[in-house]
Amino acid sequence: MSSPAHAIYSSTVSLSLQGHEFQPQYEVQLIFNATARSRLLCSAACSQNPSCRIFDYDSSSHRCRLFEADLTNGAIIATVSQTSIVGSVILSASLYASILVHRLASQTSIVGSVILSASLYASMYNQSCSACQGNRYQTCSSTSKTCQCPGNSYWNGSMCPLQLFKNAACSQIDACRSDLNLSCIINSYGKFTRCSRVDMMF
């Protein structure tokens, strides 16, 4: 029997109607753009990459794109091609590898988004690194030696959503993309308001 450190994470992929693809809000959200032999392999690539929350796939060109984005900072849009479809991925820890695909038809392109639930995070956040070793949802911090949110995500008290971009409403200091020099600004009433560039705040 496998130990939790060697757990395989299964993904349930739900596909939508034809004629859609994913459009990120910012170019930096595209983390992988290559070919894959099948939509199953493309969705598996997303499932195995801690930064991936959405993917799209075109079976005609075999284009597989992974995004560090979700539907709060990107959009599923209509395309010229009627051969594309949109989907979402719900990830859960499992000792068994399986990928369930709903509404698969003869379409050639899909978009999948990762939908995360608090139950994937709460039991291991801030625990010793052994709790998240080999885990897709949290990583071991080299400084605190505890399980923390992966890069470009933040702990909101129950899970690790992606950090926000410029002008997005925020509710805590680390909710904004620090790699883009953004911080959650505080208004004169002491309330967090929106993400803004740090150099613009002074």
Image: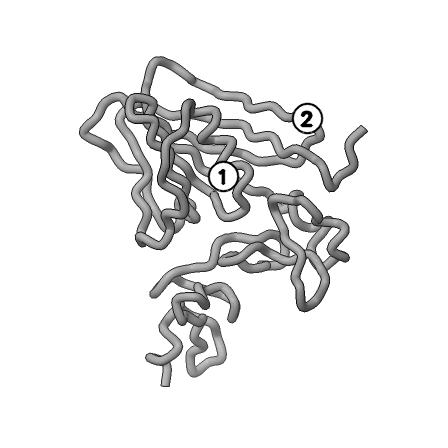
The numbered mark, 1 or 2, whose residue comes first in the sequence reads 2
Q: Position of residue 171 (x, y in %)?
A: 49, 65
Coloring scheme used: one colour
Q: Nearer the viewer, mark 1 or mark 2?
A: 2
* 123 on left or right of 79: right
Asked which secondary structure carries label 2, the reply is loop
Q: Residues within 10 Å of mark 2 (few under 14, many from 20)?
A: few
Q: Position of residue 85 (x, y in %)?
A: 33, 26
Residue hosting label 2: 96
**Quadrant of the rendered structure where residue 176 is?**
bottom left
Asked which secondary structure carries label 1, the reply is strand
Residue type at mark 2 is Tyr
Most distant residue in the top direction: 106
Report the residue at 68% width, 31% height from top.
94
Q: Give the alpha-carbon distance from disc 1 to disc 2, as whole Å.
A: 18 Å
**Quadrant of the rendered structure where residue 177 is?**
bottom left
Residue hosting label 1: 114
**Foreground residue among 52 and 142:** 142
Image quarter in which the C terminus is found: bottom left
Q: Position of residue 129 (x, y in %)?
A: 73, 55
Residue type at mark 1 is Val
Q: Residues within 10 Å of mark 1 (few under 14, many from 20)?
A: many
Most distant residue in the left direction: 80
* 20 on left or right of 185: left
In this rendering, the answer to whether 1 lies above or below 172 is above
Report the residue at 66% width, 36% height from top.
93
**Quadrant of the rendered structure where residue 65 is?**
top left
Q: Position of residue 50 (x, y in %)?
A: 54, 46
Report the residue at 43% width, 18% height from top.
103
* 179 on left or right of 96: left
Report the residue at 47% width, 59% height from top.
163
The mark found on residue 36 in the picture is none
